[in-house]
């Protein structure tokens, strides 16, 4: 194929230099002259109607240019409010101080309404409805039963819409089981997607176009969505996003849904079109904490085992908080909290049902794990309970049952039309590597052997997470330009949100073209200059964009070789391209420079750039077909994680937390980038260790933790992470043998944390975060609280 | 206070060795003035309450959260921002170390982290791992890239000691 | 942040007269990390007209030692205290309290006087104006404390002051109380035991509105003396204490001759553990006596529904801090 030089090495981050010099322009660093500022007036009530709103005094304040409410901008505002902090009005003014002063001059009269703030209350029959006349609970719309298994291929042939995802016969499975382990009410407390850079955008109308500067995970997806929401032609909107200050899925912008966190785009876009002046609308950290995507869930898990520990049956019920997301429709953004595929090797009977539950809180969306952290937490906690109950080593129980390459996937992605195989696993290798690193065999002890004030705990969990999204969203395009001077550029809007895609994609181009990595440039910053690229979500970019970039580079190379072949009078397939130009593979002296091959003659003709192009549609075209049309392999993130910790049984404080994260990445295209992704394991630790919980005042719906003092992210001092990058090359689903790697790191952390905590203190705590309060209660050091949870 | 009463003052700030006059309002923070009025947008704002360190600059060699100090109070002090680190296109050893060790993922915390690192290495040229962690205790990296960052600080300390030895 | 007038004071006398003569509410700024936080969130009933800068007053930022003890200027930063070799050697409890306060960045600007005068961190009191408007709790003229029926997991375990159950968040306050410091102000000299007095609004001390702390005097240690500080917080940096504790003891012939123990994060004001102190006098300091002192420290605790966990935590931190004092 080609030699890998850049791929597989830790070449420097492609746009690393501006990131360390301060030259990198994040959206808020682009300042237009006379740019107007925005501040938003937000609802003090979790449920209310606006009876009257008087903006006249605010409008009269010197420096105020526009006051926006549901009256003049019904696309962005409404008179019914669904959560504390919901949009009431926005002031656009010459500077932020004027905005703040003007906000105090807006007079609003509200009618307060009944509300429901917690998942537990919202699922009670007869509870207050978030959207009047609409039930709070909704089944996921894509539940299917898979059946009619082909005995030879093991693939399912039939898919029927049902009220749960299932295959096999769950009742039969439990009837046949020797051991049944059931755990109900495993609660993942409501928490927020993290990101360093707060949400926001600056919009500027340049006479022809609306230019929107913002952070992005998918410039083109978001642009098309915003154009539709603003009701302007797509060609009139240029979406600009050279850098994104981290995102983790939570900063995806879908302005069409008014409850998704993209109000800043609508406000700045509408104000700019109205005023024809640049407008900045950025969230404060408090607004960010309120309006960041959230998650929270309750899971019930029931497992069946044979005596020897072989898992045969899994039943999983998951209540997932949706907040006020969905705008009266069942929410579609929180997806698939399934742990089912984790044990696909042995589990013949499965059922899993997801219900979304509206509450009067900010909407929940799919971020960093897309439901998998919640599902893995519930399933892997229950598997751990089973291991202790059966007296089987927790690592061995997982090794016995875990997913393996070639297993049949659950096949539940709604738009993956066919049942498919898992392209690679390596979970057992990851379990071995992690166990070795923590010296599991020698140091693991049953909790009943532990004494003393400080108890050491060790826990393990495995994870698997599907890469990419189902269906057309996975399409991506790229262009590769080769210039007569022997440099090249990848033209591709794939977003680098810190996960290293700009680096990895240009590494691929360098090696396909045989050019030095340093010679490859990147055009990626806006939608006007690039073709459509996939949204980076579901850790799909190395996979989907990787195929696309590879294809575009191959196409450009083919054209250059054909030009050279013409000049050298040899067949193109006898030629090799490198940094000096093109030469005959077997005869390096027969060669031609790029400019001679192109026939470039300064300004006077010839070819000035060769452009390769590729469009890639998945899952159908991307999965490796293995010679048979109906056999698709899909990649997943997968691995195992170990956590060790010390618990102080007098104070309930956990310390010395060490995470060992082992993940099979197929081929590590850039080892440092991959390591960096694995360090993301810390995010789960925050929800375990740091009492990281969106605490809401139950009587008023106020968010009591709207800042980074009361809602905590780990510092350098709070825990250590050891990344173990496991390479098992040969994943069939990628041209370079890579597989997905990204948000998976955060998926198993709560489970392994919870399991380590149990191993330390011998009591299961089934609700995150694992606070001193819960630990001391579990240990009987303080009385359990009476009454409702 | 209404618009008419707004109190502005002409001050002289020394930023990265250059002195410049600036008309500021009393309540403007240093980070706002650096970003909006001086074009030093390398200084980031993320939490605006001193709890994340994105806006860290050096004031008289001391690492300071620029969002929590008033610009008007910084006259006569030597302010150093991320933009002042590289000289004549040559990266500072800390920046070099950051690139080598993948200290940046998204890069939003990097300017602040790098300035805190410089503040540490001015006081302590050869810090232990614990001292590095403690010195960076006010700088959050939400990408959770701390292991790479700590490697970068170690490597920067080595580079700078070597440079010092060669002088 | 909304606008205000900013005046540099050239002397403490000028600062006092600026406070007295201001047309509207006036506040002093030292390090500013607490003040700017409050102003940015617009959480007070009255927004200041004027801010008086103390950093332009010469002589308030020095540490010195004489026969009376340790003199710390009001504007000495927490970093300077934490890194002072003298403080670390003789007053390790204070050095540790300073080192564990907030984060290195905030310690670089935050001053010792600011740290003992800081406002409480109750999340109702501190609720920002940006996400639905500020909350008028009992401290801001509201009828009742919202934390009592609301979420009080980190609030007082020793009852309310003026109906408010916020806690004092300072790390250096208990250290200075254990060390029996004296606060010098523009008006008087206040023994540290009389300094803290949570009241309405921003009031957390007995200072008058036109009174400014100028120096803190920590007495010189007796021959046989130990002191220590401990803090329990979720993170090792940035966070305020769930509970913290400082202790200072003198010994003769292996027995405790005097003891000052202070818990913080448990009540509106830092809480001296007088019963624990009394129980130690005349006894050797060991696990048994420390245990007894720990239990006495929380004997009168009245935890609320959600914060019972702070009782064993407070008891344990008293024991641990005392054990740190064992020579």
Image (spheres, rainbow, N blue to C red):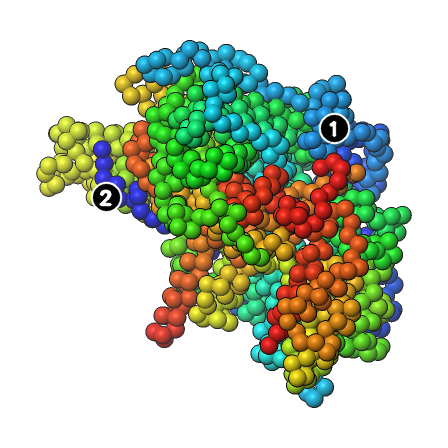
Tell me what residue is drawn at x 80 percent, y 59 percent. Answer: C300
Spatial CA distance of label 1 from label 2 is 59 Å
Q: Quadrant of the C terminus of chain A?
A: top right
User: Is residue C32 found left or right of A572 in the rendered image?
Assistant: right
* Residue at the extreme bottom of the image, as rendered: C67
Q: Position of residue C305 (x, y in %)?
A: 77, 46
Residue A716: in sight, yes or no?
yes
Image marks 1 and 2: residues in contact by CB distance under 8 Å? no
Question: What label does residue A65 carry, if any?
Answer: none
Mark 1 and mark 2 lie on one chain; the one further toward the N terminus is 1
- Quarter of the image where one finds residue C222: bottom right
Q: Residues within 10 Å of mark 1 (few under 14, many from 20)?
A: some
Residue C212: in sight, yes or no?
no
Q: Residues within 10 Å of mark 2 (few under 14, many from 20)?
A: some
Name the residue beneath numbered marker 1.
A78
Name the residue beneath numbered marker 2.
A579
Tell me what residue is drawn at x 29 percent, y 33 percent. Answer: A730
What secondary structure is found at the residue carrying circle 1?
A: loop
Tell me what residue is drawn at x 53 percent, y 60 percent. Answer: B136
In this view, A47 is above or below A161: below
Query: Are callouts 1 and 2 both on one chain?
Result: yes
Q: Of A219 and C88, which appears nearest the observer?
A: C88
Q: Position of residue C207 (x, y in %)?
A: 83, 69
Tell me what residue is drawn at x 36 percent, y 44 percent. Answer: A433
In this view, A11 is above or below A292: below
Q: Kindly identify which chain the residue marked by label 2 belongs to.
A: A
Q: Position of residue A298 (x, y in %)?
A: 62, 32
Q: Of B29 and A389, which appears nearest the observer?
A: A389
């Amino acid at each position: 194929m080609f030699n890998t030089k850049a791929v597989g090495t830790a070449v420097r981050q492609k746009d690393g230099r501006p990131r360390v010099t301060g030259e990198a322009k994040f959206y808020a660093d682009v300042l237009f002259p006379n740019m107007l500022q925005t501040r938003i007036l937000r609802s003090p009530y979790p449920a209310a109607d606006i009876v009257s709103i008087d903006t006249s005094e605010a409008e009269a304040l010197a420096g105020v240019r526009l006051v926006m409410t549901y009256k003049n901008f019904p696309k962005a505002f409404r008179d019914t409010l669904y959560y504390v902090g919901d949009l009431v009005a926005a002031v656009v003014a010459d500077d932020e101080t004027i905005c703040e002063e003007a906000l105090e001059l807006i007079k609003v009269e509200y009618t307060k309404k009944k509300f429901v703030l917690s998942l537990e209350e919202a699922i009670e029959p007869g509870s207050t409805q978030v959207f009047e006349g609409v039930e709070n609970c909704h089944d996921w719309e894509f539940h299917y039963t898979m059946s009619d298994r082909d005995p030879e291929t093991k693939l399912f042939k039939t898919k029927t819409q049902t009220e749960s995802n299932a295959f096999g016969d769950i009742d039969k499975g439990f009837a046949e089981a020797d051991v049944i382990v059931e755990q109900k009410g495993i609660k993942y407390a409501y928490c927020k997607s993290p990101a360093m850079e707060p949400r926001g955008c600056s919009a500027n109308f340049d006479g022809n176009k609306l230019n929107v500067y913002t952070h992005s995970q998918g410039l083109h997806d978001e642009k098309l969505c915003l154009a539709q929401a603003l009701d302007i032609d797509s060609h009139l909107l240029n979406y600009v996003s050279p850098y994104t200050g981290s995102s983790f899925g939570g900063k995806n912008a879908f302005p069409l849904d008014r409850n998704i966190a993209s109000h800043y785009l609508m406000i700045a876009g509408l104000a700019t079109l109205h005023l024809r002046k640049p407008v900045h609308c950025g969230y404060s950290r408090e607004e960010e904490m309120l309006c960041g995507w959230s998650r929270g869930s309750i899971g019930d898990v029931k497992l069946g085992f044979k005596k020897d520990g072989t898992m045969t049956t899994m039943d999983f019920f998951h209540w997932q908080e949706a907040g006020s997301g969905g705008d009266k429709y069942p929410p579609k953004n929180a997806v698939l909290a399934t742990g089912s595929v984790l044990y696909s090797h042995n589990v013949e009977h499965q059922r899993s049902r997801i219900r979304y539950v509206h509450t009067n809180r900010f909407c929940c969306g799919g971020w960093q794990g897309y439901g998998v952290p919640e599902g893995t937490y519930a399933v892997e906690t229950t598997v751990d309970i089973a291991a202790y109950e059966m007296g089987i080593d927790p690592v061995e129980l997982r090794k016995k049952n875990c997913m393996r390459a070639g297993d049949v996937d659950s096949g539940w992605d709604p738009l993956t039309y066919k049942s498919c195989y898992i392209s690679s696993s390596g979970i057992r290798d990851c379990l071995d590597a992690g166990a070795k690193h923590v010296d599991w065999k020698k140091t693991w002890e049953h909790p009943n052997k532990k004494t003393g004030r400080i108890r050491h705990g060790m826990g393990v969990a495995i994870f698997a997470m599907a890469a990419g999204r189902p269906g057309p969203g996975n399409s991506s395009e790229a262009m590769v330009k080769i210039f007569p001077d022997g440099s090249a550029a990848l033209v591709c809007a794939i977003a680098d949100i810190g996960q290293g895609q700009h680096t990895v994609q240009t590494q691929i181009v360098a090696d396909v073209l045989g050019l030095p990595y340093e010679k490859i440039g990147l055009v990626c910053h806006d939608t006007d200059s690039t073709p459509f690229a996939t949204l980076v979500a579901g850790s799909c970019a190395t996979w989907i964009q990787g195929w696309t970039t590879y294809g575009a580079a191959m196409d450009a190379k083919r054209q250059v070789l054909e030009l050279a072949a013409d000049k050298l009078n040899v067949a193109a397939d006898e030629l090799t391209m490198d940094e000096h130009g093109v030469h005959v593979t077997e005869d390096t002296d027969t060669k031609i420079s790029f400019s001679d091959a192109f026939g470039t003659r300064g300004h006077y003709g010839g070819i000035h750039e060769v452009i390769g192009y590729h469009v890639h549609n998945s899952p159908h075209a991307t999965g490796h077909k293995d010679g048979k049309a109906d056999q698709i392999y899909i990649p997943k993130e997968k691995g195992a994680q170990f956590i060790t910790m010390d618990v102080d049984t007098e104070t309930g404080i956990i310390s010395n937390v060490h995470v060992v994260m082992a993940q099979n990445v197929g081929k590590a295209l850039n080892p440092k980038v991959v390591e960096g992704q694995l360090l993301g394991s810390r995010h789960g630790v925050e929800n375990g260790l740091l009492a990281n919980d969106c605490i809401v005042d139950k009587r008023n719906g106020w968010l009591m933790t709207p800042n980074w003092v009361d809602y905590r992210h780990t510092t350098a001092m709070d825990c250590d992470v050891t990344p173990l990058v496991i390479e098992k090359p040969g994943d069939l689903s990628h041209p370079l043998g890579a597989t997905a790697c990204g948000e998976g790191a955060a998926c198993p952390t709560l489970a392994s944390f919870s399991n380590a905590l149990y191993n330390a203190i011998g009591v299961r705590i089934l609700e995150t975060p694992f606070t001193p309060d819960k630990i001391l209660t579990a240990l009987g050091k303080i009385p359990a609280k009476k009454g409702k949870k | 206070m209404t618009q008419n009463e707004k109190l502005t003052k002409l001050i002289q700030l020394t930023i990265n060795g250059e002195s410049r006059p600036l008309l500021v309002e009393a309540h403007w923070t240093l980070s706002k003035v650096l970003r909006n009025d001086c074009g030093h947008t390398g200084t980031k704002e993320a939490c605006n309450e001193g709890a994340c360190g994105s806006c860290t600059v050096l004031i008289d060699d001391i690492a300071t959260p620029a969002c929590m100090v008033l610009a008007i109070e910084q006259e006569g002090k030597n302010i150093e921002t991320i933009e002042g680190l590289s000289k004549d296109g040559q990266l500072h050893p800390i920046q070099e170390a950051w690139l080598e060790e993948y200290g940046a993922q998204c890069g939003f915390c990097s300017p602040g982290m790098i300035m805190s690192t410089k503040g540490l290495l001015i006081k302590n040229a050869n810090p232990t791992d614990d001292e590095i962690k403690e010195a960076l205790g006010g700088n959050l990296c939400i990408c959770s890239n701390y292991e790479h960052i700590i490697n970068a600080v170690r490597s920067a300390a080595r580079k700078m000691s070597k440079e010092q030895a060669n002088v | 942040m909304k606008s205000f007038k900013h005046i540099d004071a050239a002397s403490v006398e000028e600062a006092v007269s600026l406070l007295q003569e201001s047309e509207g509410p006036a506040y002093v700024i030292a390090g500013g990390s607490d003040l700017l936080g409050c102003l940015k969130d617009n959480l007070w009933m009255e927004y200041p007209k004027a801010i008086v800068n103390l950093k332009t007053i010469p002589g308030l930022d020095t540490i010195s030692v004489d026969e009376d003890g340790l003199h710390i200027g009001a504007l000495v930063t927490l970093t300077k205290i934490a890194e002072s070799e003298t403080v670390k050697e003789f007053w390790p409890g204070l050095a540790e309290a300073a080192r564990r306060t907030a984060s290195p960045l905030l310690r670089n600007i935050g001053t010792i006087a600011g740290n003992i005068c800081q406002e409480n961190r109750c999340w109702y009191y501190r609720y920002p104006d940006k996400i639905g408007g500020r909350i008028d709790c009992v401290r801001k003229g509201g009828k009742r404390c919202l934390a009592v029926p609301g979420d009080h997991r980190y609030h007082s375990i020793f009852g309310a002051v003026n109906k408010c159950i916020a806690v004092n968040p300072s790390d250096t306050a208990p250290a200075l109380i254990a060390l029996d410091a004296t606060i010098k102000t523009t008006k008087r000299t206040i023994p540290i035991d009389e300094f803290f007095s949570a009241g309405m609004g921003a009031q957390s001390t007995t200072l008058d509105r036109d009174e400014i702390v100028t120096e803190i005097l920590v007495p010189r240690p007796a021959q046989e003396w130990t002191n220590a500080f401990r803090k329990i917080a979720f993170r090792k940096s940035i966070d305020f204490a769930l509970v913290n504790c400082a202790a200072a003891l003198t010994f003769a012939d292996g027995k405790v001759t005097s003891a000052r123990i202070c818990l913080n994060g448990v009540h509106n004001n830092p809480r001296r553990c007088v019963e624990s102190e009394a129980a130690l006098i005349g006894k050797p300091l060991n696990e048994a006596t420390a245990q007894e002192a720990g239990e006495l420290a929380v004997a009168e605790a009245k935890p609320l529904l959600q914060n019972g966990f702070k009782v064993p935590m407070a008891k344990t931190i008293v024991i641990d801090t005392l054990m740190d004092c064992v020579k």
